Image (cartoon, rainbow, N blue to C red):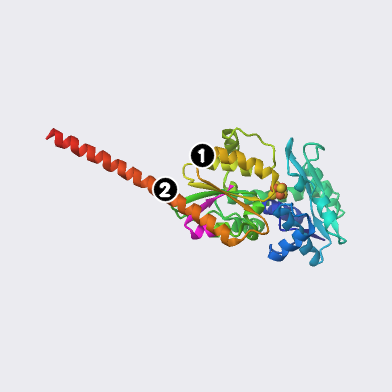
Amino acid sequence: MQVGIPRALSYYDFFPFWYGFFSDLGIEIVLSDKTTKKTMSEGSSLVVPETCLPVKIYAGHVLNLLDKGIDKILVPSIQSIAPKIYNCSKIRGLPDLIRNVVKKPFTIIDATLDKSEKNRGLYDFLKEIASYYGITDFERIKKASKSAWRVYNNFQIMRRSGVEYKKALKSAIENKVVIASEQKSYPINIAVIAHGYNLYDDRASMKIFEKLEKLDVKSYTAQNLTVEQMQEGLNAINSRLYWANEYEITGAAAHYIQDKKIDGIITINAFGCGPDSLMLERISRFAQKLNKPILHLSIDEQTGEAGFVTRIEAFVDMLFRKKRSGILNKINLKTAQADKFQVKCRDLI
Ligand code: SF4
């Protein structure tokens, strides 16, 4: 028994969960290959140009799995993860979109998770997936669900403690929990705010973390935060949960905007993304109010690496200058105070 999982969209957040679930059921996972130029161009050729880059990439990954001969692919319809909290229309309608654009014979495992309209929770969702493999024993599904949560929670714990994404993913699926190694201190700290698929797909994000590291910058993401910290961020920005990714975008950004150790914020959003354009507007206004520098990077399949790097370098350079002038001001202030003190002493003599 095999299941194909496209290495795109929710893969970047939930693969540890799927790994625990399918492994426990004895179903072998076949992942699509990492995103390449070919994945992007093949995916883009299937959908209308206005579609966001992550969905184009997703379509390319489905093709890649079909090329590998996989005939059952998990393309869930994740409508709503909690009452009155919704995913964007593209994620909600993902199975329909794939069915209509990929004209090849294969089985789409299009289980639905919808906690708002249909009150279909996680167990219904998992039961539907398992039924594609003739598994109907609820106890067996419940046990697989427990394994799924164990792997997923271990992954989350490692990420929150600061373990790097790839290392945390590898350790979680090896059923290990590692702790973050001694943290080096960096002159500049930046929070990078984006959906997991825009951050950890090296092709989409153009390896932004490596680029920042080379510039001597420490990066932080939503995955380093607890839900409570992101909720506090939402409260501070006076926003409520509506989009499924509201925590990791609005909540995390608002948290980091208030965090004094963070020198600046970089957001990465896909060109044409409706939810992000709404959330980023709020974030920008909040950053402006608190005087926190912010850089918005928009990506699509035409985005060139050179322009991307130039903008990041210019932003980091500005943060260095800002920090330096802040330190100089403090030194000047101290010198001025010292001068004043000396004058007073002279007067006394
Ligand atoms: S949230 Fe935005 S980037 Fe993500 S799938 Fe929806 S439209 Fe695309």
The residue segment tinted magenta is 211-221
Image location (x, y in percent) of residue 196: 65, 51
Taking the image as shown, residue 282 lies to the left or right of residue 81, namely left
Task: Tell me if residue 177 can be seen.
Answer: yes
Taking the image as shown, residue 217 lies to the left or right of residue 136, namely left
| Nearest to N terminus: mark 2 or mark 1 | 1
Q: Quadrant of the N terminus?
A: bottom right
Q: Residue at x 73, y 44 (%)?
A: 88
Q: Which mark is residue 323?
A: 2
- Amino acid type, mark 2: Lys
Closer-to-camera residue (335/240):
335
User: Which residue matches tag 1?
Assistant: 258
Tell me if the residue at label 2 has its CB under 8 Å from ligand 1: no
Image location (x, y in percent) of residue 287: 53, 40
What secondary structure is marked by label 2? helix
Q: Is residue 49 magenta?
A: no
Q: Residue at x 53, y 59 (%)?
A: 211
